[in-house]
Amino acid sequence: MNEMTIVYGVVLGAAAFLALRWMPAGLKARLGLENGAACASKSGCGSKSCDGCH
Amino acid sequence: MNGPAAPEIALVGCPNSGKTSLFNALTGSRQKVANYAGVTVERKEGSFLTPAGRPVKILDLPGTYSLRGRSPDEIVTRDVVLGRLVGEEIPDAVVCVADATNLRLVLRLVMELKAVGRPMVLALNMMDVVARQGGRIDVSRLAKELGIPVVETVAVKRGGTADLLAAIDRLPLLEDPPTEHGWREPTADEIRAAHAEATRILHVCAFHPGNEHLTRRLDAVLLHPVAGVIVLLAVLFLMFQAVFTWATPAMDLITAAIETAGAAVGGALPDGLLRSLVVDGIFAGVGAVLVFLPQIVILFFFIILLEDFGYMARAAFLMDRLMAGTGLHGRAFIPLLSSFACAIPGIMAARVIENRRDRIATILVAPLMTCSARLPVYTLIVAAFVPDRPVLGGFGLQGLVMFGLFAAGILSALAVAFVVKKLVWREAPEPFIMELPDYKMPAPANVALGLWIRAGAFLARAGTVILALMILVWFLSSFPTPPEGAIGPAIDFSIAGRIGHFLAPLFEPIGFNWQIVVALIPGMAAREVAVGVLATVYALSATGDEIGQALQPILAAQWTLPTALSFLVWYVFAPQCLSTLAVVRRETNSRLWPAIMFAYMFALAYAASFATYRIAGALLS
């Protein structure tokens, strides 16, 4: 595979990942990506009582 | 309605009763955390198998002292138990968790829950502590008085839930479908009668030794207005010294491992864009953040230990007078303490504050507490610019500066709260009554589990969000490539370089160069990313002998001390986290408060950095 293809693929993948992660819950629900009721926190902040925030 | 295979049990109890430890002991890793629909109260559900092989779902409800819910958390607990919460299954049974060392607190709640009429078990948690204190509870008499099964549990010990599991097996689950209960708020007379009944039951069932036990003796010192504050400061000081000194060997190991892996992978790839992405973007960027794992673990080790020991509630008690002086409610201490991990759970924890203005004041100042994402930034700059030498009788200067940065966060939070509550809203704080749990020896397994969760969260974040951000930063720092015959580092021609140069004049008065400006932008997504961005930007800016150098000596060589101090001060105050602003928007249900928060923090950061840069520059010239 061409080097540029790999590089652009990785960069686009990273951009898509972040866009999906930080998409507002309402928009996600409208797009059918989740039910919108879940916690908006998506990653680990390390808090004992939280599944993550950003 | 529940399916026939897995009945649902609600876990109810007072705050600090060990409810979450019991939930963890029962479910292990079979947990799912989300929010209740429509409200920002955390919902934790898990599952387990009883000894008879029956699958059971269990819901860990927010702590409450009664069904007369006042805060959003308590209202959720009441509504779930009563079967009133829309979208939530009505529990088939209730397990009420009691701190056996503080039985008096829970008896009225037990009587309220019993009146709801669902199958129920009372789990007397921390019975080992009662025994150690020389206390005694007549469990069979208590069961008879209350008219429900009562079992002893020690949630933090292996096998400590065996009796509870057996009792759950004996409950008449799924015999009648649960229905909504028509509970009503009790009258003052009913509350007085319930209190008298609780006192009577306590008198006939429980014996606690006099005031000579360990808790009171320790409290005589730890809650003393002078000695207690000295001990608190000493504990915090020790914590930050340890963060610096204990972590060094592990950090050196991680640095060496990342460098070795980076060199090996880089050596295997031909010169070109892909190699630059892997070496300058991923290894330099993510590696620069990963190296701070030992410090994060040590910081949380102390926090978990102190929390499990029962000291954090004492710290809240000691801080109450100081906080009341600034107009903050006593309940604000726990949200502010949580903000040392991350401002977001701290802001969410402010839900326990009933008065809206008290709650908003707490939310506004929570991001000023030093979250763990600032730690990599502080450590990098302190290690690069503060000499590692002992001062004040053997304390490390670096640890002392770190302590100062944390103290600056706390003091600025109190100062802002003072301005908001005393000068803008001119309100007196409401009285605050808090329960102090008995001291307990922290269970190593619980501490280890807590550290595992936090280390896992940090690594997951490094491997997902930070990795993705670093890839984007590398791309923006590498494209477009310089034109033919161009001289100077390629990054100067890139999108990131141009943005940095464009915005640099705005930050020049506070001593920031264009590389710092570039780091601040993705740092808005996650504070610690700034460290990775600096590593990538300097790696891509490097020429000749500089290539391959670690970030710390590069910064020491290229930044002046006033710039480094200004950068540290910026990070104490700046609104460097978009997620925090998003959560403030959600928690306050308003765009005004996140806007106010951003504006005041930006202004504070800019003014403080400006003053620091100018004063340091004048003193050093």
Image (cartoon, grey):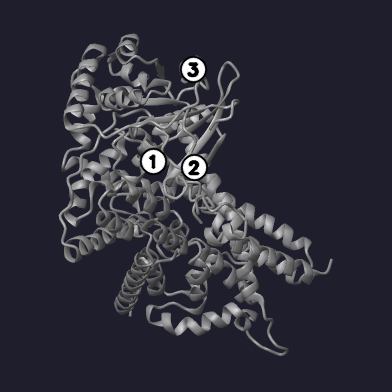
Residue B511 rendering spot, x and y as whole percentages:
40, 78
Chain holding disc 1: B
Q: In the depicted view, which residue is nearer to us: B618 or B338?
A: B338
Q: Residues within 10 Å of mark 3 (few under 14, many from 20)?
A: few
Q: In the depicted view, which residue is nearer to us: B501 or B596?
A: B596
Q: Is residue B474 above or below residue B335?
A: below
Residue B484 rendering spot, x and y as whole percentages:
73, 89
Query: What residue does disc 3 label?
Result: B172
Q: CA distance from mark 3 to mark 2?
A: 24 Å
Query: What residue does disc 2 label?
Result: B87
Q: Amino acid at mark 2?
A: Gly
Q: Is residue B122 above or below residue B417?
A: above
Say left or right for B450 vs B540: left
Can you name the residue that lies furthest to the right here?
A: A1
Mark toward the start of the polypeptide (3 vs 2): 2
Query: What residue does disc 1 label?
Result: B76
- Residue B542 in view of the camera: no
Q: CA distance from mark 2 to mark 1?
A: 12 Å
